[in-house]
Amino acid sequence: QVQLVESGGGLVQAGASLRLSCLASGRTSGSYDMGWFRQAPGKEREFVAAIRRSLGSTYYGDSVKGRFTISRDFAKDTLDLQMNNLNPEDTAVYYCAASARYLPNIRRREEYVYWGQGTQVTVAL
């Protein structure tokens, strides 16, 4: 089992930056690909960014490409999401997720088996 705990959310003004962090514990050797998803009120949980365990290849949702950066520190068992130039449409609960195997479709939330409890990000005008 892998436990994931997110931190770093908060209330910011449009144009500001935030850095989210996800700390993995437990059998972290069992976590393979990792990603960030978000869910706004009344909407489905959507893909934000992901990173492969092998080679560290990164993937981004269209709405965050060029503004967000995902990174992983294996020594610290952390997954970070640097978010720049935030806008109100980024307001959501952000979730960290991990898989137990290589994911053919890393953007598909159903592929992930481990999830954090989420951290709220609110961007005001």
Image: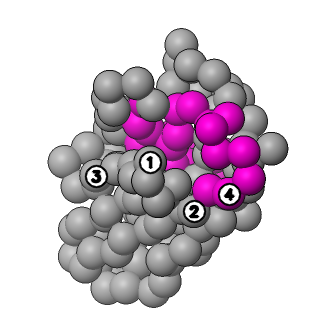
Tell me if label 3 and label 2 are in contact, CB under 8 Å: no
Tell me if label 2 and label 1 are in contact, CB under 8 Å: no
Mark nearer the N terminus (4 vs 1): 4
Q: Marks 3/2: CA distance?
A: 17 Å
Query: In front here: 102 or 105?
Result: 102
Residue receiving disc 2: 23
Q: Amino acid at mark 3?
A: Thr
Q: Which mark is residue 25?
A: 4
Magenta stretch bounds: 24-52
Mark nearer the N terminus (3 vs 1): 3
Residue at point 34%, 50% (across, down): 71
Q: Position of residue 5 (x, y in %)?
A: 65, 65
Q: Nearer the viewer, mark 2 or mark 1?
A: 1
Q: Is residue 53 above or below residue 14?
A: above
Please state if 84 lies on the left or on the right of 55 as rendered: left
Mark nearer the N terminus (4 vs 3): 4
Q: Element at badge 1? A: loop
Residue receiving disc 1: 74
Q: Amino acid at mark 4?
A: Ser
